[in-house]
Image (cartoon, coloured by chain):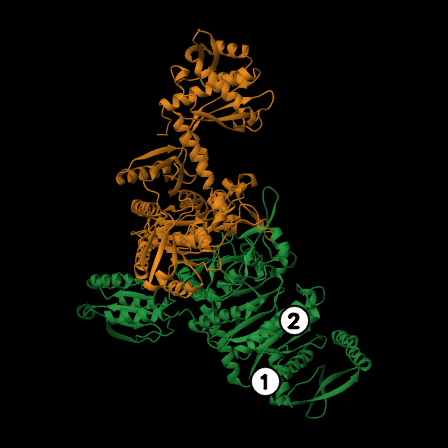
Chain colours: A orange, B green
Amino acid sequence: MMSQPVIDDLYKLRHSLAHVLAQAVLKLWPDTKITIGPPIDTGCYYDFLFAKPISDEDFKTIEKEMRGIINRGQTFESQRLSIKDAVAFWKGKDQQFKVELIEDLATKGETEVTNYRNVDADGNETFVDLCKGGHVENLKEIPADGFKIMSLAGAYWRGDEKRDQLTRIYVAAFASKDGLKAHLEMLEEAKRRDHRKLGVQLDLFTFSELVGPGLPLWTPKGTMLRNVLDDFVWELREARGYDRVTIPHITKKELYETSGHWQKFADQLFHITTREGHEFAMKPMNCPHHTQIYASRQRSYKDLPQRYAETTTCYRDEQTGELHGLSRVRAFSQDDAHVFCRMEQVKDEFLKIWDIVDTFYSTVGFKDLEVRLSLHDPENFEKYLGTPALWKNAENSIRELATDRGIPFVEDIGEAAFYGPKVDFITKDSIGREWQVATIQLDINMPENFDLTCINEKGNKERIVMIHAAIMGSIERFFSIYLEHVAGMFPLWLAPVQVAIVPVADVHEEYAKIVETKLKAVGIRTEYYDSSESLGKRVRDGEKSKIPYLLVLGDKEKDSEGVAVRNVKTKEQVEVSLKEFIEKTIRDVAERNLETSIG
Amino acid sequence: MMSQPVIDDLYKLRHSLAHVLAQAVLKLWPDTKITIGPPIDTGCYYDFLFAKPISDEDFKTIEKEMRGIINRGQTFESQRLSIKDAVAFWKGKDQQFKVELIEDLATKGETEVTNYRNVDADGNETFVDLCKGGHVENLKEIPADGFKIMSLAGAYWRGDEKRDQLTRIYVAAFASKDGLKAHLEMLEEAKRRDHRKLGVQLDLFTFSELVGPGLPLWTPKGTMLRNVLDDFVWELREARGYDRVTIPHITKKELYETSGHWQKFADQLFHITTREGHEFAMKPMNCPHHTQIYASRQRSYKDLPQRYAETTTCYRDEQTGELHGLSRVRAFSQDDAHVFCRMEQVKDEFLKIWDIVDTFYSTVGFKDLEVRLSLHDPENFEKYLGTPALWKNAENSIRELATDRGIPFVEDIGEAAFYGPKVDFITKDSIGREWQVATIQLDINMPENFDLTCINEKGNKERIVMIHAAIMGSIERFFSIYLEHVAGMFPLWLAPVQVAIVPVADVHEEYAKIVETKLKAVGIRTEYYDSSESLGKRVRDGEKSKIPYLLVLGDKEKDSEGVAVRNVKTKEQVEVSLKEFIEKTIRDVAERNLETSIG
């Protein structure tokens, strides 16, 4: 079943507020044309065709008008109308978009529609909208201090760039003043932890004017982080029988003509014409290449599953305006893997990957992933490769194993990849935003396209299936989410620099160097803050760089072979022996603990 | 000084044989035009303009004629001629290429040239060539069974594709019949160990018709090998303070306009035009990208050297006809590194890299690298970026440190990269072929082009320099050389599968599985050969796959907790305890020993 919005009190409040917004706009600019205005996750919006453009500076005026409407109070009254009467009504109001909506409903077989009229305490009609309902009883129920106009955006009527360009007004709306306040604070916090800003501040990645937008370059610290994460994924995969492979990043177009990507993704491919005139493309995904390793020799059923893993780069010709930090780039690394197996091995292989996903995400600090089965939309079958029977079979397998796993999941029609259904994992970050992260996909089409087989027990060729299983997915995108989730304060095992060594003064440099050597010898990643700057500045620098531990080393520490450990997260400073510090740090890293043991 | 050929007996023999070849050709086809015919490493060649094409089928006839000339014996007599007389002489012979050569020498200031006449026992002139000398006394000194015509090739007169296309005849020539035999055997051996054949046989890499030529795909076994090699290089680098970075594989053309690659390599670049019309290129090398990480913040002298390492892919638009297995490809991985440092740090950094090169190559089994300083050619300065003063300074630094290192080296004029001088390392493989392998390059130009600086002790901006330091270089090319060097029989630490587990029969599978589990638990790479095939076939399969150890497990081994170890290289089979086998194997791998300890 497709996930439907729940019509709860908040939905009603936000939906009603959209009517209030339209009413206020018509009061202020009576010749405005109204279109539609649905509730959304954080409030509502309404799309208008204004006679003259409005701007941010009008927000206060509109909000004031809205508050007035709410405070005076109005009820909703519904009114069923025949198509004919409704068209006449909205023509009379000179609202052509409403007329078009009604005429469309008529072509879909509707014979009646509903108008919702707002009526004030004196029984006067103040506003009418074409609507399916779901409102508060009286506008007074809407907290007048629980909403805020957030922004304007352009939107084409019915999403069609050949139709009128409308102005969308976004409103944040909550059940209380505190609810709104929390939301606005979350947005402020999101700005503060913007990965683009943190990435520069922590020296993790950079963009170059000469290299171009959407093409991040990773510094030593950022690369360390990527590699520690990627090594972790590999460790989980290696334990489950995966092998690494290596493919080139380009190919003749014939590969994608066979896979179907050429037809589906031609726009998004980076195209290359060689000096001999051959047509090549940069890879937008890795599966077609991996099939060619599988297909390089005839496999026996005994050789299956073949599990190929590779962290490698994919390329998409994204438009400049759509690029955003690491979230949307032109070249991204995937920790990709493909399993080539028989249909009866799918369940085991899916569950192995599911284990990897669970272990990886809980270890980095994303607990309780939500699970969504992304299925095909039978009403738009032309979007997909393969036959309805293949899809039904594949989707049943996935549904069965998700059920067996005994976790709650939703099913989402129309969210499948064009080559097969998938299991998507959704997480919520530390400031409440939802993100789709890992995904496991069953693919019954690619093996058809490339004629992938194994020789079975009877000596016959048997069609196999494929599973696509990225864990982080695009490492760039994962990293943008994760960096904001932890606000740059990485757990010890991930931190590119784990320990800053801070001698109090010149005379403590000798001891500090001994400490540095001992930490490095056991693989602890250190940075040395020599005493040419003041102690206060160095401690502030270490805190700004979000290094988990600052070791402040003075007379006392030198004499006792100890270290003063300043825990940057807790702001606590404690004295421990160097030996204890090393032991606990090694353990926290080896166990990939989210919290540090000292301070 | 440029490396000059040594005029030894073998040189004289080969040079004289070129005269014999031309004499034989003129005798057989008198209207042939002769050009030049130098000695080369394995014999000699001569370029002719034939009136009618010749083919492989003429080799026997030519050889017979040559043997007749040798057996009858002739001496060489030199004759100095004025330019005028020489031109008249060769015009009289209707040999226009010789006339052109003499006229060219005249424009370079020569006033006389030398003809060498062959004279037979009766005092008759049999052949004349324009030549600088260096011959045997009498053609009888040439062993008539020490040479063989090898092949024909096309060659343009003076290498200019607008001039006549000549036919080059290659002759292998040695001081004795045995010398020739050894050379021909070496060529046969090279064919047997052709990496393209071994790569398929050992399942290391593959090519796909759909992906295209010059684009290898690496299987699990090949990738394992690559990664073990690459991890070794990284271990050596990490110990010397290198950091890993990560760059995208494409860039706006502006990066290469700044670096100078756009002008120098436009033909070899894979060009991309984005859907928005921007011009991008796939990277043919990594240095320009790495400069952008350095340049992402202002560095202090305290931050230097910055040492960036990355194993990443480069792309060249090679022509299809020039592709060859892994030796010449369109996408190749480089174990690349760049050091950004001050001029006074160059020596230390060069020596560190030199240590890595020495350690890496001796460990994999290439001992005694030859060293060549590749310098610029002052007579063709237009080929290079920068100023003569910059080059002189840089080349002096390199010469000084090579001298300090106390090893023999040669200097090679004109072999520098366009951006700076380099140290090249040359190795000889197990069948005697020479290969240039690692290279260390000093670059004084790129830092100028990208305006790379550090803030020095005085607070001023100071220009830095760069060092380029690949160890394997192109991993594909290195691998093609190495695979042929070891003929697919990798040392234990590198072998993708180190141990094949071969239970004698069904009843030994249980013990065999225990052995497998124990080996895997300590990281030994195994393959299990179940007893569905005959023991003999499985042992042959293991030998064909060049797995270093086959563990044959029967009653005796099971009862004694032992293993029968068949050493595939030595063909010895010995009995040892499982414990001893594991200990010795772990040690051989950890120490990266070239030879195994058992059998």
The answer to which quarter of the image holds residue A507 is bottom left
Going by the image, does B347 lie left or right of A118? right
Which of pointers 1 and 2 lies earlier in the amino acid sequence?
A: 1
Local SS, label 1:
helix
Give the image location of residue A331, x and y in percent.
50, 48
* Circles 1 and 2 on the same subunit: yes
Chain ID, mark 1: B
Q: Nearer the viewer, residue B255 or B197?
A: B255
Using the rendered view, name the quadrant where residue B21 is placed: bottom right
Which disc number belongs to residue B250? none
Q: Check disc 2 and give the amino acid type.
A: Lys
Q: Nearer the viewer, residue B237 or B335?
A: B237
Q: Residue furthest bottom?
A: B122
Query: Visible in this render: residue A395?
Result: yes
In this view, B409 is above or below A225: below
The quadrant the N terminus of chain B occupies is: bottom right
Rendered position, B508 above or below B37: above
Residue that badge 2 annotates: B392
Disc number lying in front (1 or 2): 2
Secondary structure state at the residue bearing disc 2: helix
